[in-house]
Image: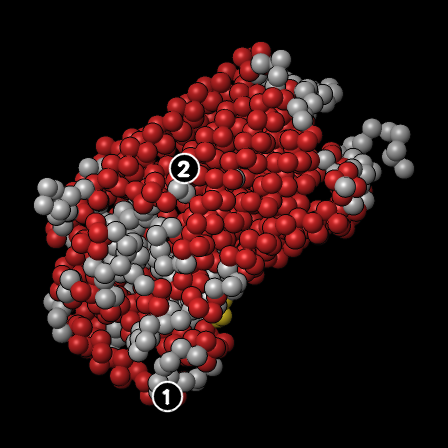
Amino acid sequence: MQSNAALEYDYSLAKKFTFLTILFGFLAMVVGTLIAAQLAFPELNYLLGEYGTFSRLRPIHTNTAVFGFTVSGIFATWFYLGQRVLKVSIAESKFLMVLGNIQFWLYFVGALAATISLLLGYSTSKEYAQYEWPFDIVVVLIWVLWGVNMMGLIGIRREKALYISVWYYLACFLGVAMLYLFNNMEIPTYFASGGLGDPIHSVSMYAGTNDALVQWWYGHNAVAFGFTVPIVGMIYYFLPKESGQAIYSYKLSLLSFWGLMFVYLWAGSHHLLWSTVPDWMQTMGSAFSIVLILPSWGSAINMLLTMKGEWNQLTDNPLIKFMVLASTFYMLSTIEGPIQAIRSVNAIAHFTDWIPGHVHDGVLGWVVFMIMAAIFHMSPRMFKREIYSKKLMETQFWLQTTAVVLYFTSMWIAGITQGMMWRAVDEYGNLMYSFIDTVTVLHPYYAIRALSGVMYLTGFIMFAYNIYKTMTSGRVLSEEPQFRTPMA
Amino acid sequence: MFHWLEKNPFFFASAISIVISFAGLIEIVPNFAQAGKPLIDMKPRTVLELAGKNVYMKDNCMSCHSQMIRPFKSETDRYGDYSLSGEYAYDRPFLWGSKRTGPDLHRIGNYRTTDWHEAHMLNPPQIVPGSIMPAYDHQFENVADIETAYAEAVTVKNVFHTPYGPEIKRGREAWDAYRPTLIEEARLIAADMKDERVKEAMAKGDVPEVVALIAYLNSLK
């Protein structure tokens, strides 16, 4: 029907999820900044009584960053680029539109309810999988709705060959589904005990060492399929689109994609080095972590080489800056991870602040930068308006880049300092420091980290403001920009 | 082959699923039964200790404390014997933690006492100068959910054959019959405590969260 006319894509769902991305991103960063400050200034633990301690808030920070911010970013970009690379408007199917809206509302309400449950202390205690069973069911429902929507859109596509980004979104869907289901196997105690106690409470299907193995197979790969795979999918679409350059190498894309799929999941056990899981599993985790550098750097290099001969764009288009810096942080993070997975390094690094440092150069530098870049690219096309302020974008870029650098450098120093102090012995072989000595020494680094949080959050508020102004008062565009995003 | 796959989404998705399943199958499945074995003669936690474990989870203690002593001299000197797989066989979930903002707690029952914990939970920096741990005063106010802990014991006994005695069984009657045993166990802990709120709650037949938590911490040996 529409074969000859230019396609009109329907961005209503992409817009809705974009709002949620910004909302949850803001929430995750506010809580993150607060808990970072609590470590430097413990009095801040008492702002909200029982509900305001570091321990109660930390899962809210992590889960809102993963399941709030990142997942809405994945949905928002999928509902934007999915249509475009498959050459089909989602509005061509009433069914998919309805499904998408159900997904949105279920997700919005579910995410809020789940956050409140964490605040009240309902937690299964498995990292990034803390939601209790009723909320797990909601997560699974949302995920299935999204999967059906994706498959449906692929089913009615005009472009027969699936573009690279679609591979990654498909893998994200399948990977997270598998991991989430297996790791969250739990039995509600209320039903198994003849109606005793709290209906929301449950007990894990796995115990002890097995539970740890399943959890870190999940925990590591939730990062893989939530923080890496879909984000790579985004950059494969947005970087060529923004720069007007074709992807450097199809073969490298193939190698990186299938390599990542095969290798990533083995590396989970590097979270359990020196623990009670069998040695051969630990060694496998270590070895595959090193191999993982190949496919990770493969994607990143493919992105950087895509800019070959066009590096001048870096100087005058802040959006390109965001994406190039994102892939650079991706490279940093994916070399740092394998280094930490080497047994001898891990002996020092594990349990210290180097680990949150590593997580945050990946998430703040790579995931958040890429998602913000995607939203900057999508906004003028969704709202048919020019970006409100290029200057604000530039300022935000430098502020947040400085913040990330402060974050990871302070945490590197903090982590290695603490790791070395824990093992330091005097000339007679006695431990040199009591535990508290290794805590008080970290104060300046915790203060720097809190400051970096404030800076990053400020940058994010600038971003939100810029998008808001773009929607409401950016100059109206008469036609859709082809490549470079117009900005005032 | 890849070009063909990219035009056939069903097979593409199947290929991804196969490729990503390998790791879990090869790394997790073969050792599953063996890694689940308890130490010889190991007893599961009492219901009161389970209630304490649930307080530990509710206030998310593992975001700052590990329960995994690694086999290094610097760790065994500081915390005691290194941890063994069998010690965790009844822990659902595992509570190893991934970050030591505070010290490891896997053998804290060996070197801290009830009154130490009481004073420490009320005001950590007073007991450990320089501590950045917040006070957990609300654990003295809140009542522990002992019924849910009992439900948990029943569940793991029936579903996973955790070796609890015959007194742990389904239904409200069994719970009512068991409850006094638990209260008695809690009294032994509370006897070493000074806080008035704890005494009042115990007199009413309630168990404050902090009492259950300390029972749990004392059981970590």
Most extreme residue toward the left, as rendered?
Answer: A428
**Relative to B142, A110 lies left or right:** right
Q: Amino acid at mark 2?
A: Ile
Q: Which residue is mark 2?
A: A339
Q: Amino acid at mark 1?
A: Pro
Dot 1: chain letter: B
Sort mark 2 into few (<14), some (14-19) or many (20+) by Cα contacts within 10 Å: some
Residue A419, quarter of the rendered image = top left
Report the front residue among A182 and A51: A182
Numbered mark located on residue B203 in the image: none
Report the front residue among B157 and A216: A216
- Residue A8, visible in the rendered structure: yes
Q: Are marks 1 and 2 on the same chain?
A: no
Write the residue at 43% across / 75% down.
B156
Q: Which residue is mark 1?
A: B166
- Residue A114, visible in the rendered structure: no
Write the residue at 54% across / 12% down.
A315
User: Quarter of the image containing the N terminus of chain A?
Assistant: top right
Write the residue at 77% across / 41% down.
B1
Residue A276 in the image: state x and y as whole percent. Answer: 36, 59
**Relative to A223, B94 lies left or right:** left
Residue A379 in the image: state x and y as whole percent. Answer: 62, 28
Report the front residue among A147 and B87: B87
Residue A477, quarter of the rendered image = top right
Sort mark 1 into few (<14), some (14-19) or many (20+) by Cα contacts within 10 Å: few
Kindly state the secondary structure of the residue where label 1 is placed.
loop
